[in-house]
Amino acid sequence: MNLAAVGPVERVLAKIVRKTAGQASSLTTRLEGFVEAGRFTGRYEGPARGAIEESFEQNLARIFARAETPRLSGVQIKAPMHLAADGALLPAIDLPFTHILKPAGTAGFEMLPIVEWLCLALGRAAGFDVPDIALAPMPDGMSPALIVERFDIRRGADDQRRLALEDFCSVLDLPASAKYDGTIERMARGLRPLSTDPAADLDILFRRAVFAWLIADGDMHLKNLALLKIVEPEAKVFTSVRFAPLYDAVTTRVFPGLGGDRMALKLNGKDDRLTRRDFMTLARTIGLPRDDAERAIAELIDCLTNAVEIVRLPGFALEPEAAASVQGQVLALAGERCAALAGDAD
């Protein structure tokens, strides 16, 4: 790839919705230092229950007022937080924004952070790059919240790189309101000329599509898929443009009103009842070699089949009555779809 064709860094950064996100903050305290068996061992010092539930219910009411399906991306709260050196998790008001807090909701969405933790754990087991995460005990009897470490910011004061996360709405020049309107094939067309390793990134895109189907993630839309762009010190063009790590992966079918949820983005013209033939047609369309596609499917099935037998929530997170049930539903769905795809001869 000719990096000069990407364009001057300043011009490309100006297009990115989150262009300043990686510039103002630096990661000085790693979450991994305050995690034990999936549980956050630091101190939560963020908003109390009332403020969180009010914000969540306002989001939910806003969606229903528009007569829309309550898609999780419109419901979920994402609070900017800062993890201090002593383990305090604080609102990132006058502090660097280093971590994202995703608290539990109401009206049937209490298990949302737990489901996302499970799906990201399955994603890590399936071989995807996944940011550090932890489930945090919350005050006032709230269900656990999910903490996610940002991957689009500098790693310490000595890191002089510039980073930008560009979601695929921006990549494809679409408004945020069109995040459900794309296709995996169109993503591939936008990805190929930008990536500094297009073959590897097309393989990741293919695997992400298969993974979303296997875990019944109906909210993998264009804003939940992104490119991570990095500029080394003194460089005038992006030195790395690669598929961003896995984030916002959720089994949507376990939530109210979403029992029959379909894929957010179509592939091979379909968003449900996908078969091995559909995925192989996708591979051919985006230029992924047949052997690579077969290998990707086999590896995902094998890894996830093993993972559903191993991945389990931290003990404290199972205290809410519904937690064990939703864990069973997520793992069972993934196991059933792996078995179905494995037995689906092309």
Image (cartoon, helix red, strand yellow):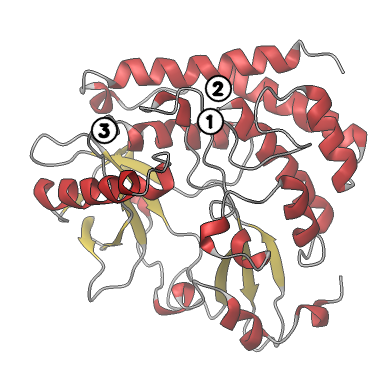
Give the labeled residue for mark 2.
307
Picture coordinates of residue 258 (x, y %)?
A: 44, 28
Quick check: marks 2 and 1 in contact, CB under 8 Å? yes
Q: Nearer the viewer, residue 155 or 288?
A: 288
Left or right, 305 with respect to 194, comes to left
Mark 2 to mark 1 CA distance (whole Å): 6 Å
Q: Where residue 346 sits: x, y (%)? A: 87, 18
Pick whichever of labels 2 and 3 is earlier in the sequence: 3
Residue at point 26% right, 33% down? 110
Query: Badge 3: how crowded within 10 Å, few (<14), some, or many (20+)?
Result: many
Q: Which element carries disc 1, helix, strand or loop?
A: helix
- Residue for point 33% across, 54% down: 78
Asked if residue 204 is positioned above or below residue 150 in the image, the reply reads above
Q: Residues within 10 Å of mark 2 (few under 14, many from 20)?
A: many
- Residue at 32% in and 72% down: 96
Q: Amino acid at mark 3?
A: Glu
Task: Give the percent coordinates (x, y) of residue 235.
Answer: 69, 86
Do the numbered discs 3 and 1 sit on residues whose CB atoms are within 8 Å?
Answer: no
Q: Amino acid at mark 1?
A: Leu
| Residue 107 in view in this figure | yes
Q: Is residue 310 visible?
A: no
Work out whether mark 3 precedes mark 1 in sequence or the reverse, and give the earlier one.
3
**Residue located beneath label 3 in the image:** 110
Horizontal side, residue 100 vs residue 343: left or right:
left
Q: Position of residue 221 (x, y in %)?
A: 57, 48
* Residue of label 1: 122
The residue lying toward the viewer, choosing from 209 and 271, is 271
